[in-house]
Image (cartoon, grey):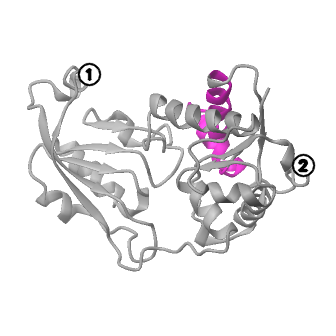
Amino acid sequence: MPRLLVVEGNTRKARLEQVAAGGIALSEGYAELLQRLLPGAVVDICYPADPGANLPIGGLESYDGAAITGSALNVYDGGPEIARQIELTREILRARTPLFGSCWGLQLMTVAAGGVVRANPKGREIGIGRRITLTPAGRDHPMYRDKGSTFDAITVHLVLGPRSRGLIGAADFARMKKGAIFVNTSRGPIVDEAALVAALREGRIFAALDVYDTEPLPSDNPFRNLPNTVLTPHLGFTTVEGLGVFYEHAIDNILAFLDGKPKNMANPDALKHA
């Protein structure tokens, strides 16, 4: 059966905080999903952000695929917990082991391949979503009782840096129309958290949040007790079904390659050099 490697992107401190808040470490969630999609697969987890971690450098060729989890880190901040992850990623690429990564994985792979990751020099990047229509499941949620089924929303997509920290505050929320939805899947500190809490307590707006000032979200954070919020633990970029689609296709491609019948290749000429 295939042997797969999951690379945990968070530090030990962040993992313990996530567990204390009622969640599980990202790598454990990845491993559980992979084993559900591919029963019998051997899934190993490594923790390169931890000092003294036992990393599988030197035996990476034995893996049929590797996946990098998300992380609360930014690669351009530097530090040993990031440097070790970049080096491991570089070794995985050298071993030509198929590698999957989303936001954090793409940062690591870019730097490992010789590229540069930096904060957005243009500052704030905000998208306006208009006429967002609720699904049947959404219409049944108590938060939307006696409300319309279509909303406007402000969504934030911006790298956290000195220029963007605290960029969205009380004045911005005061200008939002009653019933508007504020969505943040970027980085928590871009928003003045106290100002957002105050706006939500007024009951004028709603918020869907995937990121926070402190992650995992502390058990006493006021967001947890506000009825007009939807909260996810930095996993809002996808769904269980979406992750299934990602990995199902990835595993299917890996198995086809191992069977000598590669498919869905973006660069088939690379096989000439294999």
Point out the image quarter for the C terminus.
Answer: bottom right
Q: Please state the horizontal and vertical placement of residue 265, each as a whole percent of the image.
A: 59, 49
Which residues are the magenta region?
9-36
Looking at this rendering, what residue extends furthest in the right direction?
58
Instruction: Tell me, for residue 137, which label it has, or none.
Output: 1
Q: Residue at x 9, y 46 (%)?
A: 178
Relative to 245, residue 153 above or below: below
Distance between the Cα atoms at labels 2 and 1?
A: 46 Å
Q: Please state the horizontal and vertical placement of residue 179, each as a whole percent of the image.
A: 12, 42
Q: Residue at x 59, y 72 (%)?
A: 76
For label 2, the residue is 59
Q: In which image quadrant can residue 150 be found?
A: top left
- Viewer-proximal residue among 252 and 167: 252
- Viewer-proximal residue among 195 and 61: 61
- Viewer-proximal residue among 64 and 35: 64
In the rendered structure, the answer to whether residue 263 lies left or right of residue 169 reads right
Q: Tag 1's secondary structure?
A: helix
Q: Residue at x 76, y 61 (%)?
A: 273
Magenta segment includes 32? yes
Of badges 2 and 1, nearer the viewer stands 2
Asked whether the viewer can see residue 204, the reply is no
Instruction: Tell me, for residue 170, which label it has, or none.
Output: none
